[in-house]
C-alpha cells in the first residue's frame, strides 16, 4: 500500500508542477460556478435550494477534463522510457496502476472540494436536501473514477498522449451518451441491457438522491475493468 | 549474489534476439558485456532485471530463479536502463528519495542513503536543481545514484558512459570500480577501451550468441595466431635485408612499411624466437637495429573478427 501512495504522491506533485492541476481547477470552477450561479437555468432563476444544475454541468465538464488528466499517466512514461525504470523497481504492476489511478482521483476530489462553498451558500439561502447533495457528490466521484480508469487504460495503449486522450474520449462517449441514445432504439431485454450500460442513467438516479447497489456495482465494475485492462497492457511486455 | 544464466532465449516476432546464452557472474566481479548494436545485450539485461519476461532457459540470482522470485529479487538489483530515462520534472533530491522509497529502503534510513549517494556521485552542487536542467554528465550520475540508492548486491548498467566527455568517462569508471568492489556488476558498452579499464571479465555477444568469454588477456592470447613486430633496421640495403629475412626461422611474412627509413612489418609463428634471431642478424651484418616493437592484437581487432562473419 505504501508503494501505491509513493507513486500517487509523485504523480500528484507532477500535476501541480506542470500547471495541469491549476488549469483544470480554474476551468472546472469557472464553468461550474458560472452555470450554477450566473447564467442559464441558474439557482436564482430556478429559485430552488438545489445543486441539480451544478451536478449536470460537472457531469459534462468532468467528462472532457478527465481524459486530459489521464492521457499522460502511462503514455508519457512509455515515451520517455521511464516506464522501464518504474517497472524494474521493487513494486508490482498493480501498484503502479493503482498509484496512478489514485493520483487522478485525488486531483478530482480536490477540485470537488473547492465547490464546497456552493452547498454552504445554499444552506444560507434556504433549506437544501443534504442527502441529495451528498449523493450527487458521491455520484460525481464514482463517475470520475470510472472515466479515470477508462483514461488510464487508453493511456496504457500508446506512447502518444493525444491518441490516449482521443481514445479515452471515444470510449467514454459510449458510456456518457451513446448507450443512452441507443437504449431508446431497442425494446425489451436488449433495451434494458443497453440502458444499464449507460452511465448517465446511473448518475442521474444518484444525483436525484438515490443510491442503489446496482449503481455502485456498475461504477465499480467499470473501474475494475479499466484497471485490469491497463495492467494487462503492461503485462504484455512479458510475452514473446 | 552470483548470477547464473542458462540457455537464455528471447524472440521478438520470428527474430531471435537472444539465442541460447549461458554464463555466470560471481559476486565482486565486474563483467563487461560487449557486442555490436542489436546483438542482444539490452534484451539480456532487461530479462535479468525483470522488465521483460524470460523467453526460454533460466536466470538464477543468488540461487533464486527470476521466473518465480522476480518481485523479491528486484530489491537486490540496481538498474541503469539504456538512454538513462529520468523524471525530468523532479529535483535531484526528491527523485532519489522517490526511488529509495520504491525500493523499500526503511524510512529512517532514506535521508542518510540519499545524502550518501549525493556525496558519492558528487551531486552536491546540483542536488536542488530539476533533472531537466542538468548536463548529460550529471544526469548520468543521477542515473547511477538511483540504481545504487538501495545498496543492491547486483548492478546492471546498460551503457553507463555513452555521451560523456573523456573526463566524465574516467570519473564514472572510477565510480563504478569503487562501488563495484563488493557487488556483482554487469555493464554493457561498445566502447572497447572501457571494458579493459573497468572490467574483470569480457563477454562478447553477437546475433544473440556468446562468441567470446574471458579476461582481456585470454581473449588476446586466443586471437593471437601470429607474433607481430614492427622493426626499424638502418644501414641495410633493401635487397640484402629481404634475402636475409627470408632465411630466418619461423618468419611468415615481411613487408616494408617505409623502406627509406628501414621500417618493416614482420610476422612470425609464436615461440620461434624471432626477436633474438633478428638481433643476431643485424649484429652479423653490422646493421643498426633502432626499433623493435611487439604489436599487441588490439581488442578492436578481436571484436571485429568475432562479430563480422
Image (spheres, rainbow, N blue to C red):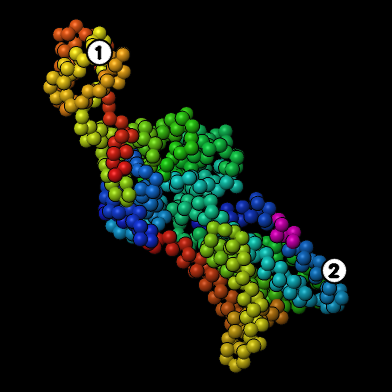
- Residue B191 appears left or right of A214: left
Q: Which label lies toward us, 1 or 2?
A: 1
Residue B262 visible? The answer is yes
Q: Quadrant of residue B34?
A: top left
Residue B65 lies left or right of residue A161; in this view the side is: left
Q: Image point 53% across, 51% down: which residue? A: A80
**Rendering coords of residue A138 (x, y %):** 66, 73
Q: Which image quadrant is residue B189 in?
A: top left
Residue B69, picture quadrant: bottom left
Q: Is residue B214 magenta?
A: no
Q: Secondary structure at mark 1?
A: strand
* Magenta range: A22-27
Q: Nearer the viewer, residue A126 or A52?
A: A52
Q: Residue at x 53, y 71 (%)?
A: A224
- Percent x, y for residue B72? 38, 55
Q: Which residue position holds label 1?
A: B233
> From this viewpoint, is residue B279 visible?
no
- Percent from the top left, x then y, of residue B154? 36, 45
Tell me if A99 is positioned left or right of A26 in this view: left
In this view, the residue farthest toward the bottom is A188
For this rendering, which residue is in front, A86 or B32?
A: B32
| Mark linked to residue A38 | 2
Q: Quadrant of the C terminus of chain B?
A: top left
SS at mark 2 in the image: helix
The residues tagged by marks 1 and 2 sit, at their Cα atoms, a distance apart of 102 Å
Mark 1 Cα within 10 Å, few/some/many (few <14, many 20+)? many
Q: Chain of mark 1?
A: B
- The secondary structure that most of the magenta stretch takes on is helix
Amino acid at each position: 500500500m505504501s508503494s501505491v501512495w509513493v507513486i500517487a504522491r509523485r504523480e500528484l506533485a507532477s500535476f501541480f508542477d506542470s500547471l495541469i492541476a491549476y488549469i483544470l481547477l480554474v476551468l472546472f470552477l469557472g464553468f461550474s460556478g458560472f452555470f450554477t450561479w450566473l447564467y442559464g437555468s441558474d439557482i436564482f432563476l430556478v429559485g430552488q435550494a438545489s445543486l441539480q444544475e451544478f451536478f449536470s454541468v460537472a457531469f459534462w465538464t468532468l467528462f472532457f477534463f478527465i481524459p486530459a488528466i489521464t492521457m499522460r499517466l502511462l503514455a508519457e512514461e512509455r515515451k520517455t522510457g521511464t516506464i522501464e525504470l518504474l517497472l524494474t523497481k521493487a513494486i508490482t504492476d498493480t501498484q503502479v496502476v493503482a498509484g496512478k489511478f489514485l493520483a487522478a482521483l485525488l486531483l478530482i476530489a480536490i477540485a470537488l472540494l473547492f465547490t464546497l462553498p456552493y452547498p454552504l451558500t445554499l444552506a444560507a439561502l434556504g433549506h437544501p436536501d443534504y442527502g441529495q447533495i451528498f449523493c450527487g457528490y458521491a455520484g460525481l466521484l464514482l463517475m470520475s473514477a470510472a472515466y479515470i480508469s477508462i483514461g488510464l487504460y487508453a493511456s496504457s495503449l500508446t506512447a502518444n498522449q493525444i491518441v490516449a486522450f482521443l481514445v479515452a474520449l471515444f470510449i467514454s462517449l459510449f458510456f456518457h451518451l451513446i448507450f443512452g441514445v441507443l437504449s431508446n432504439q431497442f425494446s425489451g431485454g436488449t433495451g434494458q441491457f443497453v440502458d444499464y450500460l449507460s452511465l448517465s442513467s446511473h448518475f442521474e438516479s444518484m444525483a436525484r438522491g438515490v443510491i442503489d447497489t446496482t449503481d455502485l456495482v456498475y461504477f465499480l465494475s467499470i473501474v475494475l475493468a479499466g484497471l485490469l485492462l491497463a495492467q494487462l497492457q503492461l503485462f504484455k511486455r512479458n510475452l514473446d | 549474489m552470483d548470477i547464473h544464466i542458462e540457455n537464455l532465449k528471447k524472440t521478438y516476432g520470428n527474430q531471435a534476439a537472444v539465442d541460447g546464452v549461458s554464463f555466470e557472474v560471481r559476486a565482486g566481479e565486474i563483467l563487461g558485456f560487449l557486442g555490436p548494436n542489436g546483438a542482444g545485450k539490452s534484451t539480456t539485461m532487461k530479462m535479468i532485471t525483470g522488465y521483460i519476461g524470460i523467453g526460454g532457459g533460466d536466470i538464477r540470482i543468488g540461487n533464486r530463479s527470476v521466473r518465480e522470485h522476480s518481485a523479491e529479487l528486484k530489491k537486490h538489483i540496481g538498474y541503469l536502463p539504456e538512454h538513462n530515462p529520468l523524471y525530468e520534472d523532479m529535483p535531484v533530491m526528491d527523485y532519489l528519495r522517490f526511488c529509495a522509497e520504491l525500493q523499500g529502503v526503511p524510512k529512517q534510513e532514506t535521508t542518510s542513503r540519499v545524502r550518501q549517494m549525493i556525496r558519492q556521485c558528487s551531486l552536491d552542487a546540483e542536488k536542488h536543481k530539476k533533472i531537466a536542467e542538468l548536463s548529460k554528465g550529471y544526469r548520468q550520475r543521477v542515473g547511477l545514484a538511483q540504481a545504487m540508492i538501495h545498496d543492491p548486491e547486483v548492478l546492471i548498467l546498460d551503457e553507463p558512459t555513452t555521451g560523456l566527455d573523456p573526463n566524465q568517462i574516467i570519473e564514472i569508471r572510477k565510480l563504478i570500480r569503487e562501488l563495484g568492489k563488493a557487488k556483482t556488476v554487469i555493464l554493457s558498452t561498445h566502447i572497447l577501451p572501457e571494458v579493459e579499464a573497468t572490467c574483470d571479465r569480457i563477454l562478447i555477444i553477437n546475433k544473440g550468441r556468446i562468441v567470446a568469454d574471458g579476461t582481456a588477456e585470454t581473449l588476446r592470447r586466443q586471437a593471437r595466431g601470429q607474433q607481430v613486430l614492427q622493426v626499424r633496421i638502418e644501414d641495410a640495403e633493401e635487397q640484402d635485408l629481404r634475402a636475409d629475412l627470408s632465411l630466418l626461422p619461423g618468419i611468415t611474412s615481411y613487408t616494408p612499411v617505409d623502406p627509406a627509413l628501414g621500417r618493416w612489418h614482420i610476422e612470425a609463428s609464436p615461440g620461434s624466437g624471432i626477436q633474438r634471431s633478428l638481433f643476431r642478424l643485424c649484429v652479423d651484418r653490422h646493421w643498426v637495429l633502432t626499433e623493435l616493437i611487439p604489436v599487441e592484437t588490439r581488442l578492436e581487432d578481436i571484436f571485429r573478427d568475432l562479430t563480422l562473419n
